[in-house]
Each structure stands twice: as structure tokens, then as C-alpha cells.
Image (tube, helix red, strand yellow):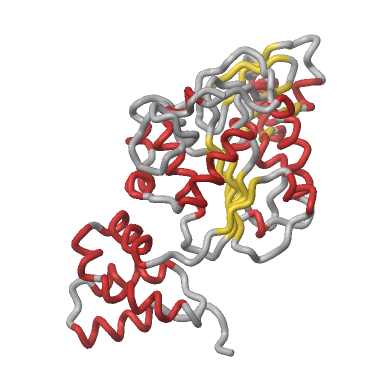
Amino acid sequence: MTDASPAGEWLIYRGTGEPHTGIDGLPEPPPWRDFDGGPLVQQGPGADSSSARRLGAYRHMAEMHRPSPEELEMVNAALYLRRPLLVTGSPGTGKSTLAHAVAYELGLGRVLHWPIVSRSALQDGLYRYDAIARLQDTQIAANSGTAPPGGIGSYIRLGPLGTALLPTAKPRVLLIDELDKSDIDLPNDLLNVMEEGEFGIPELERLAEREPQVEVLTDDGAKVTLREGRIRCRAFPFVILTSNGERDFPPPLLRRCIHLELGRPDHQRLSTVVRAHLGDEAATVGDDLVTRFLERSRSELLATDQLLNAIFLTHHAAPPTRSRLADMLIQRLDRPR
């Protein structure tokens, strides 16, 4: 195995917040995780040196995130083995931030984000086909005597998962957020796609003989050409599945993932979150609220968002009002026992 970094360390993602091209030193995947997608497509917006500007609100979090040794090991294990990383933990522990930190440091572009709700289905992540819009456009063209609209590709857009599986030179980063909110079928439905690294679009496969190449939109808004209605990855995406621990997942999914359990954030990590969102001054002034938040979180269910709200609103308040406002904003999310 070749060295993964100039220092001979095995870490590809180092957690320093400094962008580098260490992903280029990633060794060949295990034989059972080696994919052979078609011709490479453009990596997508944000895959160049300007990716930091496109991170938007997540840029400071990505730059300042300092993972624990266990996080580093599990992230790099997922990179080496080309396996999804299942990250579990309470809200506010940095599950989503980890995806943006890896994308930023390794220059892998914009994070593809698939937020899960109870109605989410596998196809939502793969692609959307607007058959109704196509029918309406065809009818309008026929009634007006104008030329028919564009081909079927104009009505197909790849979802975050579908875009992540396009054959690119470097892996895309895909965040499948709050998988535990899905219905009972979605975790099982993900298994085959995650294992095979490919999927077909039936609407295009039926037309493959007549239209072997069709141009469609990606989740990034770019246009790519699909051949014979199928997508197969070349560099398996770095996939983070997050869960708040509200449900158990089927063993077949668990054995295909690298599992990382994030504990409660400590004072340093919470201060970093505050600094990234609200700046150095707010982090300094609100340090006492961070301490109170941690003390209460030992016996109460609290969320980091509540701490940010409290520090933001109490930044300029007088001490008595400040303390009262903080208590009003940081209310326990569970019932007292």
C-alpha cells in the first residue's frame, strides 16, 4: 500500500481544516468495491479550488471542525473501504458538519444533501421524472401547431444520490440526513444501490435502442449525458448517513456501513460551533452559557440550536435579563422524570 500522505501516515482526511489533495493518494479499493463506470463526467460545481466559497454557511464549520481520533479513524476507514459511514448521535453533535469538513479539506466540491422525511422513497434520491409537464408541453405544442418540446431528458433530473453515483474521477460527498425519520422500507431499499453502485432509469432504458444517449440535469444543475439509461459510479461516493438514534436499522444495512457513534459535545467543541456561527466575540461573552448548557445537558435533553439562539439573543442584554432569556430559550426537549 502506498503512503496516503507526505509523512507516510495512513490518514487521507486529517481533520486539520486545511484543504489538500490527499484524496489523490487514496490507494485502489478492495476488489469487491471496485467500480467501472462509463466515461468520466465533470466533477460538478465546487470541485475546484473555489469550493470553499461555495460551501456557504457551512464554510466556517468545515474549516474549524476538529474531529476526535475515533472520528478520524472511522472517516478514513470509510474512504479506504468505499463504504457508507453511518453516524449516530444526539442533535447538535456535529454529524452533518463532518460531511462538509471532509468535502472542504479534500476538495471534493459541494456536498450533495438528501434530507430524509417520512415520505422519502429511494427514487426521490435517484431521479425525478416530470411526466405531467411533458404531457402538458406536448399538448400545448399540438394545439398551437408549433414544434414539439425537447426530448425526454428535459423532464428528468437526477437527485442527490443519483448525482453522487455518476462516474467521476474523485468521489462526491453525499449526506443522507436523518435516515431514522424514513419509513421502514427506505433503509432496505438503499442496500442494492449502495452495494452495486449503479441503477437504471426505466423511462430511458425503454428508449435505449432509439435514443442511446440522453442529456439530463444533475442535482448540481449541470447537464450530463447518460448512455442506455444507466448510471454506474467509478469513484464510489463518500456517503454519510446520519441518525439521531430514534430507531434501529436492519442488520444487512449495518454490516455494509462503517458505524461511528458521536458522544455529547464537550466545551471545546461547543465553543467552536458558537465561534463558527456567531464569531469570536459572541463565543467569549457566551462562554458561561456554554458551561451552563453542558451542566444541564447531563440530565436534560437539549439541542445545540437552543444554545446558539440564547447566545445570539442575550449578547447585548443586561445580566438579569440575559439569564432569564437564556433559561426561556434553552428548555428541555424531554419530559422530566
Question: Residue 87 location in percent, x, y?
Answer: 58, 53
Q: Describe residue 134's horizontal placement relative to residue 104 as left or right.
A: right
Closer to the camera, 128 or 255? 255
Q: Describe residue 329's horizontal placement relative to residue 111 as left or right.
A: left
In this rendering, the answer to whether 236 lies above or below 112 is above
Q: How many numbered marks appear?
A: 0
- Can you say which quadrant of the picture contains the N terminus? top right
In this rendering, the answer to whether 161 lies above or below 268 is above
User: What's the residue at 59%, 58% (across, down)?
Assistant: 88
Residue 155 visible to an observer of this rendering = no
Closer to the camera, 147 or 44? 44
In this rendering, the answer to whether 71 lies above or below 29 is below
Closer to the camera, 127 or 23? 23
Question: Residue 29 location in percent, x, y?
Answer: 64, 26
Question: Residue 251 location in percent, x, y?
Answer: 79, 53
Question: Residue 122 location in percent, x, y?
Answer: 72, 43
Answer with the quarter of the image where residue 55 lies. Answer: top left
User: What's the residue at 35%, 67% (across, down)?
Assistant: 267
- Can you say which quadrant of the picture contains the C terminus? bottom right
User: What's the residue at 69%, 23% (across, down)?
Assistant: 35
